[in-house]
Image (cartoon, rainbow, N blue to C red):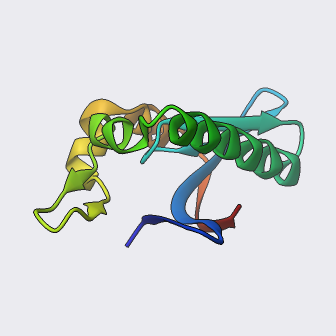
Amino acid sequence: MKRIEINNTGIMAELSLFMFKEGDVFHAYCPELDLVGYDYTEEDAKKSFEYVLKDYLDYTIQNGTLEQDLINHGWKKSKAGKVSEPTPASLLKKSQLKDVLRKKEFHKYSVPVTL
């Protein structure tokens, strides 16, 4: 299960990350948030993604828009107030995931991030 947890000690997220290469550039793409980091090595592309994710979370938390943005990306809010990950079918409709899956070579990771 993919998740984003926010508490008084920080932010912990576990998200899918698809790594693929276009030309000389590696892309680290997260379909659950439709975010991408990129660089000339896989490791640097992952670091770029972590920077993009941190910037995204900082911005949406400061502006009070994180929950609505997650919902806009297909996350569902339960009656108990918990937000759960989007379904694979909804990701294929709303993100660039179809384009990534059509590529001949990609790697999928489950990435834990603590900020």
Q: Nearer the viewer, residue 4 or 8?
A: 8
Q: Is residue 39 visible?
A: yes
Figure quadrant of residue 39: top right
Residue drawn at the location 53% of the way across and 42% of the way down? 61
Judge from the rendering whether residue 94 lies leftward or rightward of residue 97; answer left or right.
left
Residue drawn at the location 76% of the way across and 43% of the way down? 51
Q: Compared to 35, does 114 lie above or below?
A: below
Image location (x, y in percent) of residue 22: 71, 29
Q: Quadrant of the C terminus?
A: bottom right
Judge from the rendering whether residue 65 lies leftward or rightward of residue 74; answer left or right.
right
Image location (x, y in percent) of residue 91: 31, 43
Which residue is the extreme one toward the left? 79
Q: Compared to 16, does 75 lie above or below?
A: above
Numbered disc total = 0
Judge from the rendering whether residue 5 lies leftward or rightward of residue 67; answer left or right.
right
Residue drawn at the location 31% of the way across and 37% of the way down? 68
Judge from the rendering whether residue 53 lies leftward or rightward of residue 68; answer left or right.
right
Which residue is the extreme one toward the front? 8
Q: Quadrant of the N terminus?
A: bottom left
Q: Is residue 28 visible?
A: no
Image location (x, y in percent) of residue 49: 71, 44
Q: Nearer the viewer, residue 51 or 40?
A: 51
Figure quadrant of residue 37: top right
Residue drawn at the location 46% of the way across and 42% of the way down? 33
